[in-house]
Image (cartoon, rainbow, N blue to C red):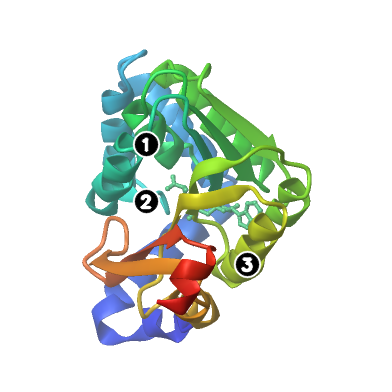
Amino acid sequence: MHLWRFLLPSALGFTARNAGHALIDKISGAPARTTQAAKFASLHAQPGDPEDVLRTLDRFAMEKRWLMSVGPEKGPLIEELAGRLPPEARVLELGAYCGYSSILIARALGPGSTVVSVEVNADAVSSARANVELAGLSGQITFLHGPSTDIISQLDGTFDLVFLDHWKDLYKTDLQLIEKRKLIRRGSIVVADNVGKIFSPDDYLDYVRNNGQYRSENRAGTIEYTSLPDAVEISQYNPQPDSVSR
Ligand SMILES: C[S@@+](CC[C@H](N)C(=O)[O-])C[C@H]1O[C@@H](n2cnc3c(N)ncnc32)[C@H](O)[C@@H]1O
């Protein structure tokens, strides 16, 4: 990863503001950011209205504290992919944070579809559950608390869409584990957030672009709630020999 890029002049304003907020929260003993976001949503969003819950979380991220949710700029891209899935689709998400992308995806899915979202941080799991309940989508989304690699080893069945949005250095190895456990099948879509130059998970990009098992496409965007460049990689799993010989 090239996190030093957060110190470039174009990113310095964002980095300083975010570090300042983190320091103020630490000194004042404020709750975790995800807890603050869920509290804000509970006070300001319309219960049972996923759109309004997302809008309210966006407002929190822009007016109060930055959130690493996928956000309103890259969000519609993920939503469009989810909207194209057949009824009773299954989605696996690695990295739930506040539950923003879980809500975004779940509301785009067809009838009978479900989302399983894996999150290692306990505060984040509680906040995600609270936001999803507020949005009225608890019946569609299950949060599993624990490290992705452990949880992937316990999952069954296949997923139509996998959204990789946890720590970038785990993207490649977790995807390989997902393949090994046959949790994706031919045609499944794997979407990876934050693959732009700043985070730059080069090993992952090299893997999905060059190992002959995926048709991969890159979409430019910006880091959530900023104008800093970012990108999303959309890869369709094509493990059959015909794709290898093409
Ligand atoms: C970028 S945020 C996820 C944002 C969320 N997908 C959204 O758009 O609303 C990354 C999250 O991944 C979680 N995470 C990091 N490493 C993880 C791991 N190994 N297993 C599960 N969750 C992990 C972090 O705790 C954090 O909440």
- Residue type beneath disc 1: Leu
Q: Gap in Å between the C-alphas at discs 2 and 1?
A: 20 Å
Question: N-terminal of the two: label 2 or label 1?
Answer: 2
> Which residue is at a point 53% across and 16% down the rendered structure image?
139
C-beta proximity under 8 Å, tags 2 and 3 = no
Residue hosting label 2: 70
Residue 50 screen position, x and y as percent: 33, 24
Residue 37 screen position, x and y as percent: 44, 37
Front position in the image: 82 or 127 = 82
C-beta proximity under 8 Å, tags 3 and 1 = no
Question: N-terminal of the two: label 3 or label 1?
Answer: 1
State whether residue 110 is above or below residue 68.
above
> Which residue is at a point 26% across and 33% down the rendered structure image?
55
Mark toward the viewer: 2 or 3: 3
Which quarter of the image is occupied by the C terminus?
Answer: bottom left
Residue 11 screen position, x and y as percent: 30, 77
Q: Gap in Å between the C-alphas at discs 2 and 3?
A: 18 Å
Left or right: where does residue 178 sit relative to residue 49? right
Residue 177 screen position, x and y as percent: 70, 60
Front position in the image: 60 or 176 = 176
Question: N-terminal of the two: label 2 or label 3?
Answer: 2
Q: Residues within 10 Å of mark 1 (few under 14, many from 20)?
A: some
State whether residue 135 is above or below residue 63.
above
Secondary structure beneath label 2: loop
Is label 2 within 8 A of ligand 1 (CB to nearest ligand atom)?
yes
Is label 3 within 8 A of ligand 1 (CB to nearest ligand atom)?
yes
> Which residue is at a point 46% across and 28% down the rendered structure image?
39
Secondary structure beneath label 1: loop
Secondary structure beneath label 3: helix
Residue hosting label 1: 85
Residue hosting label 3: 170
